[in-house]
Amino acid sequence: MTTYEIIVTDVTRYGTLYCVAGWDRIRGGMIRPEPSGAIAANEPSRFWDGQHAGPNRTFAVGNIVRFDANAPAANFQFPHATEDRILVAGQPIMLLAQQTVAQTAQAVAGGISPTLEAAFNNGLIRAASNKAHVPIGYNGRSLGAIEIAPNQIQFYVQSFDPAKPQLRSRITVGNNLYDLSVPADAAKSRWQGQGLAGLQADAQASMRIHVRVGLSRPFAAMPNSCYSQVNGLYFL
C-alpha cells in the first residue's frame, strides 16, 4: 500500500461514468486512481460515478487529493497498467486543496512532451486517417501532455450514430495532423451547452493551450489498439 497525493489533471466522461488521472506530487509522473473494486475484465468497475468525479466533486480538475492505493493486478494490461492504481478499500479519500486551471498547468509543466509520440514513449502509431493508437501490451505511458497554439486545433462532431454524436479534434503538432476524440468532461460540457462555436472561441481567445492526452482502452471493433484522445484542455 502506498499513499499518494495527486493534482487532478484529467477528468473524462463516458455516459454517466468518469475516468480520472492526476500528477503524483510526491514522486512525479501521472497515475490513474481506480475504485477499490476495479476488475481488469469488468470495464465499468474501473470508472467513477458522479458522486466522486466531475465538477464540484472530489476528483475535479485542480483538486489536490490524498489516498492509499496499490499497484494493479498482473492481469491489468499495459500501457494503462503503467499508471493504474487501485484504491485500498475502506481508506479515506481526502481533498487537501484546490487550484485554478492556470496553477494546475504550471504545477504539471514537468510532464509536457515535445510531440504526441514522445508523450507515449514513442509507442504511438499514426494511420493514414490521422487517427493514432498504441498497441495493447506496449510497456509505456498511457497519459501525458503537450502544449499548442490556438491555431493548432479545430473541433468537429462525428455522428456515426445520430443518437450519440462524438466531439473530436484535429490537432497539428510539428508536421503531423492528428484526429483525436475529446472525452474531456469540461470540453464536452462546453460543446453541449454552447456548441462548437463556443468551444472554438475559448481556444481562439487563449494564448496557448495545455492539452492533456491519454489512451482509450481497446474496444470490440479494435481489440488490440488503444487510441489517443484528448483528456483535458486548459485554455491559458
Image (spheres, rainbow, N blue to C red):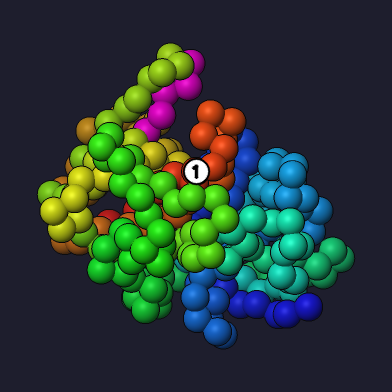
Query: For this rendering, which residue is in front, 89 or 215?
Result: 215
Check if residue 227 falls in the magenta segment: no
Give the answer, above or below, for where 126 lies relative to 105. above
Residue 16, located in which quarter of the rendered image? top right
Q: Amino acid at mark 1?
A: Ser
Toward the viewer: 56 or 65?
A: 65
- Start and end of the magenta stretch? 163-167
Seen in the image, is 229 located left or right of residue 71?
left
Q: Residues within 10 Å of mark 1 (few under 14, many from 20)?
A: many
The reply, left or right, for residue 93 in relation to residue 79 is right
Q: Is residue 156 visible?
A: yes
If the image is split into quadrants, where does the N terminus sit?
A: bottom right
Name which residue lies at 35% across and 45% down.
132
Q: Position of residue 157 (x, y in %)?
A: 32, 27
- Is residue 184 something one can see in this rendering? no
Q: Quadrant of the C terminus?
A: bottom left
Q: What secondary structure do most residues of the magenta stretch adopt?
A: loop
x then y, percent, for residue 94: 69, 71
Vertical comparison of 194 with 201: above or below:
above
State the residue at coordinates (28%, 34%): 129
Q: Residue at x 74, y 44 (%)?
A: 41
**Residue 91 rendering spot, x and y as whole percentages:** 82, 70
Q: Position of residue 153 (x, y in %)?
A: 21, 46
Given the current orientation, which residue lies at the most extreme top position? 162
* Residue at mark 1: 225
